[in-house]
Image (spheres, helix red, strand yellow):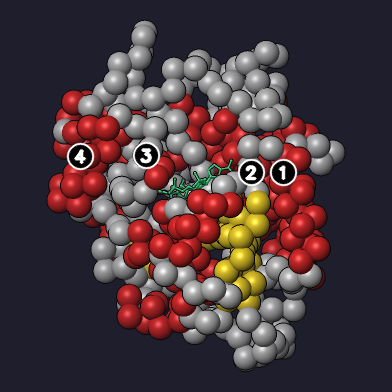
Amino acid sequence: MALQASFLPSALSPHKEGKVGGGIKDSAFLGTSLSDHVKSDLNCSLLRCGKRLNASVGVRAQTAAAAAAATASPAIERATPEGKKTLRKGNVVITGASSGLGLATAKALGETGKWNVVMACRDFLKAERAAKAAGMSEGSYKIMHLDLASLESVRQFVGNFRLSGMPLDVLVCNAAVYLPTAREPTYTADGFEMSVGINHLGHFLLARELLEDLKASDYPSTRLIIVGSITGNTNTLAGNVPPKANLGDMRGLAAGLNGVKGSTMIDGGEFDGAKAYKDSKVCNMLMMQEFHRRYHEETGITFASLYPGCIATTGLFREHIPLFRLLFPPFQKYITKGFVSEDEAGKRLAQVVSDPSLTKSGVYWSWNKNSASFENQLSEEASDPEKARRVWEISEKLVGLV
Ligand SMILES: NC(=O)c1ccc[n+]([C@@H]2O[C@H](COP(=O)([O-])OP(=O)(O)OC[C@H]3O[C@@H](n4cnc5c(N)ncnc54)[C@H](OP(=O)(O)O)[C@@H]3O)[C@@H](O)[C@H]2O)c1
């Protein structure tokens, strides 16, 4: 903790008036501290013990090699226990596939030759250039416009996707913005604070709309994956770096996050871009569980979330101060050892999309230092069923579903 609290971040903190600025509080942030790693491993061992004691606690740890092999061989051309069988390629929609984790995942899946990847991106040309620069083969992907900062765009995307005639087998809600240095809130087209508007509300509407398409799929394993983060989990050291995620009584969310009827923050507090990101990630992880509770039994769809590791080089940090962007990757690589390359993180997410052994629903996946996946524990808030229900109900009003 001392390491995390005293090293890089405070030195990089751009000061905000009246409060600690977007420095350590947000900077240590996406990181995994040394202790987090120990904790991850400890969690893993404890879970393994739990499995021996109680067969109902499932832990799927596997070697990196086995995981890579599984990723390369998704569950097609074979029957599932439910008797579904298909000979076709899988179709996966990945939001925010124009950079970072989304791009690396699109590439990893495309390279297997077993997936058609729909890159759902707000900037068509950027996505096309990124796919080409990553060496993705033509025919392995298709780019479709989606701006999660506009509910109208989300609805148009759903309409366009349906017009394409492709079945939907897996949806990955990956796109996000992180605005740690913003002094003032910015807003989506519908007037929601930007981080929660894009990361949570846009994805919530998208996932709710495309649920019908997932239900209609004949693919052996259909999945809805929402990318989470360690930073929203206050049961980790990284999640305890101020400002901590906290949805409070959700008065700001209920008032529409627009700063007019109420606060721009979910908990009703003063705007803080770093906290808004973390709160949005809590919503992402809560939504995954609420989908699971409401729809898994009825539909067989696997609902999952994950923390892919600290991918310190991605565009997520583009709004941060230059010194932070320079020092954060070596800090994560050599000091906390929490660093994960974009390629490695992409393989991890691709596993959650395609690995036949990762079909358990309601799970938040993480990876230990040997790159073996395991079911991680969410914080009390990020696993609170009552909060999940309230976020669901308020969100469906905000996006016009009820
Ligand atoms: N990096 C990490 O250490 C880390 C750790 C834990 C979790 N994560 C999660 O991983 C996911 C991907 O992040 P990343 O690190 O890969 O960051 P990234 O490289 O910045 O990727 C974010 C993607 O989201 C897209 N996006 C942003 N706003 C959008 C909008 N309004 N509509 C549609 N797409 C939009 C971006 O599009 P443009 O290219 O057009 O900007 C970009 O493709 C996020 O959910 C993040 O929370 C990251």
Q: Which picture quadrant has residue 372?
A: bottom left
Task: Identify residue type, mark 4.
Answer: Leu
Q: Which picture quadrant has residue 202?
A: top right
Q: Residues within 10 Å of mark 3 (few under 14, many from 20)?
A: many
Q: Residue furthest top?
A: 18
Most foreground residue, 18 or 104: 104
Reading the image, the residue beneath label 4 is: 327
Reading the chain from its start, which is encountered first: label 1 or label 2?
Answer: 2
Q: Residue at x 58, y 34 (%)?
A: 196
Q: Residue at x 27, y 38 (%)?
A: 325
Residues under numbered marks 4 and 2 in contact, where contact means CB atoms less than 8 Å apart: no
Q: Residues within 10 Å of mark 4 (few under 14, many from 20)?
A: some
Q: Can you tell which of label 1 and label 3 is closer to the viewer?
A: 1
Reading the chain from its start, which is encountered first: label 1 or label 3?
Answer: 1
Q: Is mark 2 within 8 Å of ligand 1?
A: yes
Q: Is mark 1 within 8 Å of ligand 1?
A: yes
Q: Element at badge 2?
A: loop
Q: Which mark is residue 317?
A: 3
Q: Can you tell which of label 4 and label 1 is closer to the viewer?
A: 1
Residues under numbered marks 3 and 4 in contact, where contact means CB atoms less than 8 Å apart: no
Reading the image, the residue beneath label 2 is: 147
Residue 346 seen anywhere in this rendered image of the structure: no
Task: Identify residue type, mark 2.
Answer: Asp
Residue 83 seen anywhere in this rendered image of the structure: yes
Q: Element at badge 1?
A: helix
Reading the image, the residue beneath label 1 is: 153
Estimate the x, y position of residue 206 in percent, counting from the top left. Answer: 70, 50
Instruction: Check the picture and name the quadrant holding the N terminus.
Output: top left
